[in-house]
Structure formats: structure tokens, C-alpha cells
Amino acid sequence: MTVLGVDAGHRDRSALERMILDAVPEPILLCTHPVRHGQAHHAASVELDPATAATATMAFLAQGAAVAEDGQVTGPDEHAPGASEALAAHRREGRAVRFPGQHLLRGTLTLAEAEATGVVDRIDPLGGPLPPDTVLTTHDFVRPVYRAGELILEVTPATTGVIPFELEHQHICGH
């Protein structure tokens, strides 16, 4: 596997995801990471088949991104730190957009069933522990987060059990 850190200065996380997925339609793992120095924005780490890494790198560079791989950074200097940080955070910190087994967390299942898939290391309910038979309605959209190397699905109470903390079409406060 090859892992790339990519930063093109995207403030819009969805635009970053589209850029990555246009170049790498089926990544093994794609995570977004906040970049907090300079103008706040998002970078990405993408794990992909080594056979597609050179083509993906060229596509990212053509979009004005910096690309980090194996301690080397290519591309605009202003994005180099974010690309390096994203690469260093891969599988340790960040928000998973595409990940192995993602298809197993679709639809409605109990927390016990979701944990039994082995896709995430744990489920973290807002407000504390819940019974294993609590119903999780994913709406076919889950974005677990890496914290200290663990992939964690954050969930929040809903009328029928729990839902993922991040919704597909959520409203950003103040906009």
C-alpha cells in the first residue's frame, strides 16, 4: 500500500473529498484532517494501490495540491506542511471518508451488530454507554474518526435509537 498526504488549501471539506475521489475513485482508506496553521482548512491522507500512486500524485499536483509521500513533499510550499501533517496523521487521527468494510455499516442495525462487523474499533455514544440492542440508523452514511489510532463511530440519540453524529446533509451553524 502507498499512503499520500494531500493539501490543496480546501476550506470546503466536501470539495477536498471530491478532488481526492476524482483521482482515486476507490481508495483503500481516505481521511480528512484539519489544518490549523495559516488559513484554517482541510488536508487528506489517502491509502491506495501502489500501481495508481503516480497517476494520483500527478492529478493532485495539477489541482495545485502539495503531495507528501515517504518523507518527501512535492508541490506548492504553502501547502507542504498540511500535506506532511495529513500523512503523519494517517490511521492515527482524522475523519474517515472511505474505509475498509464501510458497506457493512449501512441501513439499520443494533450497536452489537455494528460492533460485531469489526469495521470500527468502538462506538462512542454521546451521553454515555447504551445497551447493545440500541438501534443504529445509519442512513447509509457513516464517518467514523480516528483517535489515537482507534477508528471510532460517534453516535447521538435519535427518536428511534441512535444515528451517526455526522449527518450527510448537515447544516453548518451560522451559515
Image: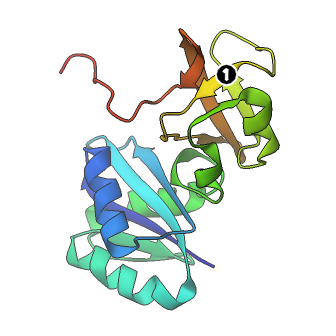
| Image coordinates for residue 154, horizontal then vertical, percent | 61, 28
Q: Residue at x 65, y 49 (%)?
A: 104
Q: Residue at x 21, y 16 (%)?
A: 174
Left or right of 159 in this view: 15: left
| Image coordinates for residue 171, horizontal then vertical, percent | 28, 23
Residue 38, compared with residue 110, is above or below; it is: below
Name the residue beneath numbered marker 1: 135
Residue 28, compared with residue 117, is above or below; it is: below
Image quadrant holding the N terminus, namely bottom right
| Image coordinates for residue 40, horizontal then vertical, percent | 30, 40
Q: Residue at x 60, y 24 (%)?
A: 155
Q: Residue at x 52, y 91 (%)?
A: 51
| Crowdedness near tag 1: few (<14), some (14–19) or many (≥20) residues, C-alpha within 10 Å | many
| Image coordinates for residue 17, horizontal then vertical, percent | 35, 55
Q: Secondary structure at mark 1?
A: strand
**Could you tell me the amino acid type at mark 1?**
Val
